């Protein structure tokens, strides 16, 4: 399957700071990437759909000014959590869409906000 | 009403047995169906995709799709303890590229 990388894998930050997470498709070009978050023992929650060269589409209830998404190239999408607070602590996972609707997931970023 | 439903489990099977995981979906326009495996603390990994009615086999895994019944299943033959994970059913094709995920079924394979 296709390879998607995510960086960093783990980040601990102080409340009020911003954190940027990078998602890269390593061996294919992804016109569409997705950002999810997952709390312990819960299923994936789609946050937004990111299309190369256009504004991200956010799911209902997700604050677009808090979770800034940029998809500047066919292989890179970034998620910036602005002014992070402890309730933003979660497992953030990106995925890249393949040719037949399948999604290939990155390894995830575990964010802890103190 | 949930759009993709799975039994949450846990489903416990002995080593060597067949594990059967089931999923139903509500959108008749769905075109693509996927099974992901997620180990605790890790991200999901795609293990099977199926797009047409019938069975699709890949090693120890068989995916079955019945669009008339809006039902998709995953069979794992000769289950191993390393198969212990949460299995996510995902459905797509009518959501602008988005996949709708079920809550996942936790599988435990006992040695």
Image (spheres, coloured by chain):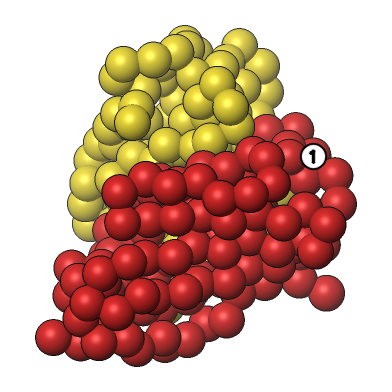
Chain colours: A yellow, B red
Residue name at image x 43 percent, y 47 percent: B57
Determine whether A39 is above or below A6 in the image: below
Find numbered disc 1 in the image and state the secondary structure of the residue it sits on. loop
Q: Residue A72 in the image: state x and y as whole percent.
A: 49, 13
Answer whether residue A89 is visible to the viewer in this image: no
User: Which residue is under mark 1?
Assistant: B94
Q: Quadrant of the C terminus of chain B?
A: bottom left
Determine whether B33 is above or below A80 in the image: below
B33 displayed left or right of A59 = left
Q: Residue A44 in the image: state x and y as whole percent.
A: 52, 60
Total labels: the figure holds 1
**Foreground of the two, A48 or A106:** A106
Few, some or many C-alpha atoms within 10 Å of disc 1 (few <14, some 14-19, many ≥20)?
A: some
Q: Residue B60 in the image: state x and y as whole percent.
A: 31, 56
Residue B4 lies in what quarter of the image? bottom right
B88 displayed left or right of A27 = right
Chain letter of the residue beneath label 1 in the structure image: B
Q: Residue B29 in the image: state x and y as whole percent.
A: 85, 44
Q: Quadrant of the N terminus of chain B?
A: bottom right
**Foreground of the two, B89 or A12:** B89
Q: Residue furthest left?
A: B111
B15 displayed left or right of B64 = left
Residue name at image x 45 percent, y 55 percent: B62
Residue name at image x 58 percent, y 27 percent: A100
Answer whether residue B66 is visible to the viewer in this image: yes
**Foreground of the two, B21 or B39:** B21
Residue name at image x 60 percent, y 32 percent: A101
Residue A104 lies in what quarter of the image? top left
């Amino acid at each position: 399957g296709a390879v998607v990388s995510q960086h960093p894998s783990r980040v601990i930050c102080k409340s009020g700071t911003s954190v940027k997470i990078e998602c890269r498709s390593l061996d294919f070009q992804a016109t569409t990437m997705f950002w999810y978050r997952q709390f312990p023992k819960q299923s994936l929650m789609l946050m937004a759909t990111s299309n190369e060269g256009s504004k991200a589409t956010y799911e209902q209830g997700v604050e677009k000014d808090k979770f800034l998404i940029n998809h500047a190239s066919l292989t890179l999408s970034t998620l910036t959590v602005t002014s992070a607070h402890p309730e933003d602590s979660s497992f953030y996972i990106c995925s890249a869409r393949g040719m037949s609707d399948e999604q290939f997931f990155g390894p995830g970023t575990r964010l802890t906000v103190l | 009403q949930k759009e993709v439903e799975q039994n949450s489990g846990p489903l416990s099977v002995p080593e060597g047995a067949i594990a059967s995981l089931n999923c139903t979906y509500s959108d008749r326009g769905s075109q693509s169906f996927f099974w992901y495996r997620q180990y605790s603390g890790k991200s999901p990994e795609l293990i099977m995709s199926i797009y047409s009615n019938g069975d699709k086999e890949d090693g120890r895994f068989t995916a079955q799709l019945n669009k008339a019944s809006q039902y998709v299943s995953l069979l794992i033959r000769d289950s191993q303890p390393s198969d212990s994970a949460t299995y996510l059913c995902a459905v797509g094709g009518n959501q602008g590229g988005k996949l709708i995920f079920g809550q996942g079924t936790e599988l435990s394979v006992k040695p």
